[in-house]
Image: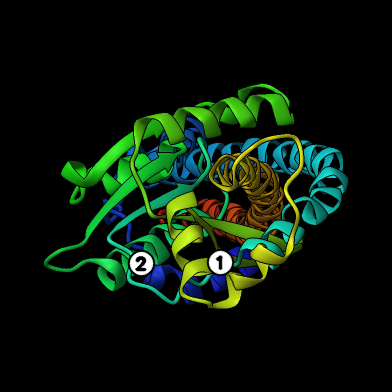
């Protein structure tokens, strides 16, 4: 009865199998010879080899995806830890430069001949589009302030913006700084950077482009402007917004120009300190979001690969059963 079932199932499923035709057996075989022939039939090199390779490839791919998922989860945890360490300092530094902007202003009414665009970016990737965003804003500022009698230069902070800007704006870059975030950020380190920028470039207006941190998934490209002491004096002379500076009394024997020079330098260092911290927070938040998305994508890919592996394995088992049934049916028919 069992052999009859094998023959019936074999006749039903045999047309769907792409296997080599079985030569009819013209002489009676012993039971041992039948077992040997059936074993050799099931060990055909063609289809069975391909099925074994396909399942092995899927298993290797699943292993690779699991390893990548572990890495992305670890990077997300590291970014979250660094974000907590920097976020509080960034929020506290926002009050340093705002009084200077209220006093000295950031939107000159007179024509500015020399402009310097300071672009802040990250040294590492895998942090979304924060670097490309500040580069786009910097290029837009360059086009806006460029002219026949105007000079616009770049100061690049960060390896990623440097790699992008060097492609088409190499001649307009005055200074590049990398590995700023290698050590924990502090005001002394940023003030040294600000002093180097002031010594190496001549400017009427410094425009700092950075990403202002709002939340883990949101950051806003921001431009902060620092005017030179000469422009501030001209603004106060023409009676613009900065004309209120004349109402202040100067003590200590310093001239108005010296006071404005000191205020401009201190304002630039404070703005740079806040901008660097805000950009670092935006970088960590964007990296957290990117790694979280990568981990979810890896999980979805792992589910699809698991389904593919199970289907391939089930198809392999089904095909092997069909081959056994077909071989037994052929041997039974040869009797």
Q: Nearer the viewer, mark 2 or mark 1?
A: 1
- Camera-side residue: 83 or 190? 190
Q: Quadrant of residue 66?
A: top right
Crowd rating for badge 1 (residues with CA inside 10 Å; few <14, some 14–19, many 20+)? some
For residue 290, side relative to residue 130 (left or right): right
Which SS class for mark 2?
Answer: helix
Q: Which mark is residue 178?
A: none
Q: Residue furthest front?
A: 253
Question: How was the colour assigned to the protein in this rendering?
Answer: rainbow
How many numbered tags mark residues here?
Answer: 2
Please name the residue shown 44% across and 48% down the image: 118
Q: Give how far across and how far down residue 240 sits, in percent.
A: 53, 78
Q: Quadrant of residue 144?
A: bottom left
Q: Give how far across and how far down residue 267 sits, in percent.
A: 64, 47
Q: Residue furthest left?
A: 148
Q: Which residue is mark 2?
A: 141
Can I make out residue 85 in this image?
Answer: yes
Q: Which mark is residue 106?
A: 1
Residue 28, placed above or below residue 33: below
For residue 98, side relative to residue 152 (left or right): right
Please name the residue shown 57% across and 50% down the image: 127
Q: Give how far across and how far down residue 179 sits, in percent.
A: 52, 26
Which quadrant of the figure contains the N terminus?
Answer: bottom right
Please name the residue shown 59% across and 42% down the image: 255
Residue 324, placed above or below residue 140: above
Mark 2 or 1, nearer chain start = 1
Please name the residue shown 35% across and 40% down the image: 162
Crowd rating for badge 2 (residues with CA inside 10 Å; few <14, some 14–19, many 20+)? some
Residues at marks 2 and 1, CA–CA distance in whole angstroms:
15 Å
Which SS class for mark 1?
Answer: loop
For residue 135, side relative to residue 69 (left or right): left
């Amino acid at each position: 009865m069992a052999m009859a079932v094998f023959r019936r199932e074999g006749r039903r499923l045999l047309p769907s199998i792409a296997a080599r035709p079985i030569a009819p057996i013209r002489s009676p075989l012993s039971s041992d010879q039948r077992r040997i022939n059936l074993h050799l039939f099931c060990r055909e090199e063609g289809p069975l080899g391909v099925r074994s390779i396909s399942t092995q490839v899927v298993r290797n791919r699943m292993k690779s995806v699991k390893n990548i998922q572990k890495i992305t989860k670890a990077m997300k945890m590291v970014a979250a830890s660094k974000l907590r360490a920097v976020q509080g300092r960034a929020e506290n530094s926002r009050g340093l430069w705002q009084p200077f902007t209220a006093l000295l202003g950031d939107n000159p009414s007179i024509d500015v001949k020399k402009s310097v665009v300071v672009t802040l970016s990250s040294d590492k990737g895998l942090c979304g589009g924060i670097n490309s965003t500040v580069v786009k804003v910097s290029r837009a500022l360059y086009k806006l302030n460029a002219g026949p009698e105007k000079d616009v230069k770049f100061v690049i902070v960060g390896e990623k913006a440097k790699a992008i800007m060097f492609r088409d704006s190499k001649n307009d870059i005055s200074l590049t700084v990398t590995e700023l975030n290698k050590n924990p950020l502090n005001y002394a380190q940023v003030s040294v950077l600000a002093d180097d920028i002031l010594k190496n470039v001549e400017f009427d207006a410094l425009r700092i482009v950075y990403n202002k941190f709002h939340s883990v998934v949101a950051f806003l490209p921001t431009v902060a402007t620092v005017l030179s002491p000469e422009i501030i004096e001209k603004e106060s002379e023409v009676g613009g917004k900065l004309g209120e500076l004349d109402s202040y009394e100067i003590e200590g024997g310093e001239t108005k120009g010296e006071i404005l020079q000191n205020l401009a330098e201190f304002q630039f260092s404070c703005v740079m300190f806040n901008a660097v911290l805000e950009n670092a927070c935006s970088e960590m938040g964007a990296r957290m979001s990117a790694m979280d998305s990568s981990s979810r994508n890896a999980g979805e890919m792992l589910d699809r690969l698991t389904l593919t592996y199970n289907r391939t394995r089930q198809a392999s088992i089904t095909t092997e059963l069909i081959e056994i049934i077909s071989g037994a049916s052929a041997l039974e028919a040869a009797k």
